[in-house]
Amino acid sequence: MHRARKRFGQNFLQDSGVIYSIVAAINPSENMHVIEIGPGLGALTRPLLSNLDRLDLLEIDRDLVAYWNQENLKGLNVIEGDALKFDFLEWAKVRPANSGLCKVVGNLPYNISSPLLFHLVSAAHMIDEQVFMLQAEVVERMVSKAGGSEFSRLSVMLQARYDMELVLEVPPEAFDPQPKVNSAVVRMIPRQDFNLSNAQWHALEKVVAAAFSQRRKMLRTNLSAFADRLALSDSELKARAQDISVERYIEWAKILAT
Ligand code: SAM
């Protein structure tokens, strides 16, 4: 029997109702092109595979990779690797000829969730949907709107790239071993209207990082390096980073990148 490894964030889902709801949210159908990050012992993998012709698995734990290879299930393609280094763009491009929607899913290891979400942004234009279980606190920040206390750098950057919705909240009792925190499932769909060039995206990263560098300070201070180019209004100069909408940050990024 596999012993859960803390360093790989291994908390295995046990609750069949929660598993059912996540699989329903992913909505697998035959020819979809799907990769599951961190299959663990297969709480999601098995029900997903029963609705798919083919499923790619990406797993870092060598023992679990060996377990899945041994299972040798039809349609399963096991990849041993680190999701933080994996080339999702290449994966999304190289797909069976008749494949349908392209989805990245998983009950993610919480210790790497933010860097992994940012790593996936570079493949967003080739991906139709992501459905992830994450720490509830992170999901709250992802979906929080301007003015909300959780609105942060993560909210702006991810909302600039994805439409996101909270699907389900999941208590620690749904797992074995139980995590110390609450969890939540989020759906992320790359925005149809996303039109930032690479230079504009980098400008967005810069201006958002500067705006949120000292949360309590006014933008007059945090954005002083950009003030002359952005022509901030009086009320914006007095505002704090968490009061500015995602769309306004995008406008600023476009100005800064020209
Ligand atoms: N999907 C299973 C479930 O719901 O029961 C397991 C989820 S567990 C929270 C996270 C999984 O991600 C584990 O299988 C772990 O070994 C794997 N993992 C951890 N870090 C990883 C990484 N950097 N790249 C790929 N997989 C990773």
Image (spheres, grey):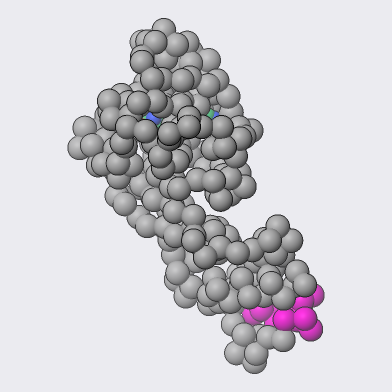
Q: Which residue lies furthest to the front in this view?
A: 97
Position in image of residue 120 (x %, y %): 57, 44
- Examine the rendered structure and indicate whether residue 162 appears above or below residue 255: above
Position in image of residue 254 (x %, y %): 69, 72
Is residue 157 visible in this depiction of the protein?
A: yes
Check residue 225 for magenta coloring. yes
- Examine the rendered structure and indicate whether residue 187 appears above or below residue 214: above
Q: In which quarter of the image is the C terminus?
A: bottom right
Query: Left or right: 53 with respect to 19?
Result: right
Q: State how many labels appear.
A: 0
- Examine the rendered structure and indicate whether residue 118 appears above or below residue 209: above
**Nearer to the camera, 106 or 243:** 106
**Nearer to the camera, 251 or 113:** 251
| Residue occupying the point 55% across, 49% down | 124
Q: Quadrant of the N terminus?
A: top left
Position in image of residue 169 (x %, y %): 30, 49
Check residue 141 for magenta coloring. no
Q: Residue furthest left?
A: 17
Q: Which residue lies furthest to the bottom in this view?
A: 234
| Residue occupying the point 56% across, 50% down | 125
| Residue occupying the point 38% across, 50% down | 186
Residue 211: image quadrant is bottom right
Is residue 44 visible in this depiction of the protein?
A: no
**Nearer to the camera, 165 or 48:** 48
Position in image of residue 26 (x %, y %): 33, 42
- Examine the rendered structure and indicate whether residue 239 appears above or below residue 100: below
Residue 107: image quadrant is top left
**Which residues are drawn in magenta?**
217-230
Query: Left or right: 205 with respect to 125?
Result: right
| Residue occupying the point 52% across, 65% down | 193
Query: Left or right: 243 with respect to 31?
Result: right
